C-alpha cells in the first residue's frame, strides 16, 4: 500500500487489525471501509493543500459564522 501511495487505506487497515469487531465484517464490508478511508484521506489532503495555496489572512470555518 505504501508503494502505491495509499496511506489512508494503510492507516485504516492497521486500525482494522487492532479492532476485533471489524473481524466479524465480510470481506466486501472491510474493503469498502478501506476504500472510503482512502477517499476521505485524499479529500482532506487536497483541501489542506488548497487552503495553504490560498494564503488566507484569517483562518475561518463555516461553524464560526453567527
Image (cartoon, grey):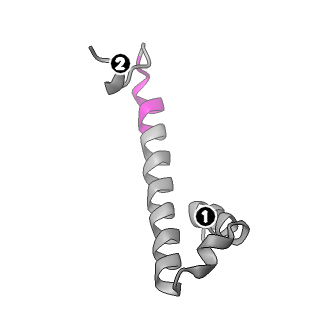
Look at the numbered disc 1 and give the secondary structure of its residue: helix
The span shown in magenta is 50-56
Q: 55 or 66: nearer the eye?
A: 66
Crowding near the residue tagged with mark 2, few <14, some 14–19, many ≥20 C-alpha atoms within 10 Å: few
Q: Is residue 53 magenta-colored?
A: yes
Residue 41, x across and y down, in percent? 51, 54
Q: Is residue 5 magenta-colored?
A: no
Indicate which disc residue 4 carries.
none
Q: Is 26 above or below relative to 46?
A: below
Q: Quadrant of the N terminus?
A: bottom right
Q: Residue at x 53, y 77 (%)?
A: 30
Q: Residue at x 73, y 66 (%)?
A: 18
Residue 48, x across and y down, in percent? 48, 38
Residue of label 1:
12
Crowding near the residue tagged with mark 1, few <14, some 14–19, many ≥20 C-alpha atoms within 10 Å: some
Q: Quadrant of the C terminus?
A: top left
Indicate which disc residue 64 carries.
2
Q: Residue at x 53, y 70 (%)?
A: 34
Amino acid at each position: 500500500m505504501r508503494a502505491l501511495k495509499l496511506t489512508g487505506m494503510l492507516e485504516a487497515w492497521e486500525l482494522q487489525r487492532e479492532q476485533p469487531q471489524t473481524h466479524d465484517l465480510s470481506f466486501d464490508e472491510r474493503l469498502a471501509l478501506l476504500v472510503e478511508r482512502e477517499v476521505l484521506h485524499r479529500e482532506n489532503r487536497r483541501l489542506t493543500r488548497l487552503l495553504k495555496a490560498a494564503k488566507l489572512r484569517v483562518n475561518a470555518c463555516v461553524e464560526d459564522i453567527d
